[in-house]
Amino acid sequence: MQFRHEWKHEINSIDQMILRSRLSAVMQRDSHAVGGVYRIRSLYFDTWNDQALRDKIDGVNFREKFRIRYYNNDLDYIVLEKKSKINGLCSKQSCRISVDEAQKIIDGDLNWMIKSERALCVELYAKMRSGLRPKTIVDYTRDPFVFAPGNVRVTMDYDIRTGDFRTDFLNPATLTLPAGDSHIILEVKWDEFLPDIIRDAVTIPGRHVSAFSKYEQCRIYG
């Protein structure tokens, strides 16, 4: 399992414009971006007593979360993901799933998962049998940049919206609401080292590393 470093900063629209200019000069746009950005829709999982949410709020040293997501309303590419965090380092495991499989997960039709050759599907099966359930939709727009040395990825996420307790995330017309007064979130991720040119480019005076969670923000209504 590959663990990566991750910084998160809450920034404003002026910061975002400055960073777009800086990053465009030293980094490449993510190949998945359309017009420089792409839209992400995720469905996050949690237990009946919100264990994942409470672990995040309490700052538990080792925690994990499951989600399924797709990009730019394209249902031909849906991924199941598990994100783990330990000692401030992050890792992500993922596998493709079909529209039919995603709908079965949402509906609680789980028996097919135990027969899957995808280990992550089998793990999600066990977790859902122990009480994990789809919890809420999280929508946002991402402004992405990549830099090969250090495997660096810099993103700015904004227009964060919540489905509250809706789980019909395969329906592009599903109503979502602004997730409160959420900031623009700058995320910087890298493997072994962060090149100085990128470190300098993402430095904004007065902005400090935060522990912002889009899932936590999208649970503000309950």
Image (tube, rainbow, N blue to C red):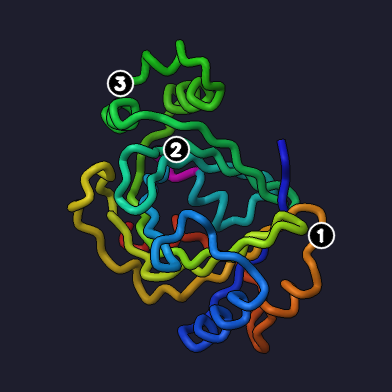
| Residue type, label 2 | Val
Considering the whole magenta stretch, tell me its main secondary structure: loop
Using residue 96 as the reference point, say whether residue 27 is left or right of it: right
Magenta stretch bounds: 47-51
Is tag 1's residue or tag 2's residue first in the polypeptide sequence?
A: 2
Q: Which mark is residue 16?
A: none
Residue shown at the point (75%, 53%) measured from the top left: 191
Could you classify mark 1 by the number of other residues whose Cα lies within 10 Å: few (under 14), some (14-19), or many (20 or more)? Answer: few
* Residue ID for mark 3: 109
Q: Quadrant of residue 217?
A: bottom left
Q: Are marks 3 and 2 in contact (CB under 8 Å)?
A: no
Q: Position of residue 207 (x, y in %)?
A: 63, 82
Could you classify mark 2 by the number of other residues whose Cα lies within 10 Å: few (under 14), some (14-19), or many (20 or more)? Answer: many
Is tag 3's residue or tag 2's residue first in the polypeptide sequence?
A: 2
Q: Are marks 1 and 3 in contact (CB under 8 Å)?
A: no
**Residue 49 lies within the magenta run:** yes
Q: Nearer the viewer, residue 164 or 13?
A: 13
Q: Comparing marks 1 and 3, which lies closer to the viewer?
A: 1
**Residue 221 lies within the magenta run:** no
Q: Which mark is residue 193?
A: 1
Residue shown at the point (33%, 63%) measured from the top left: 161
* Residue ID for mark 2: 79
| Residue type, label 1 | Phe
Q: From where the camera sits, is residue 5 visible?
A: no
Q: Comparing marks 3 and 2, which lies closer to the viewer?
A: 2
Report the number of discs: 3
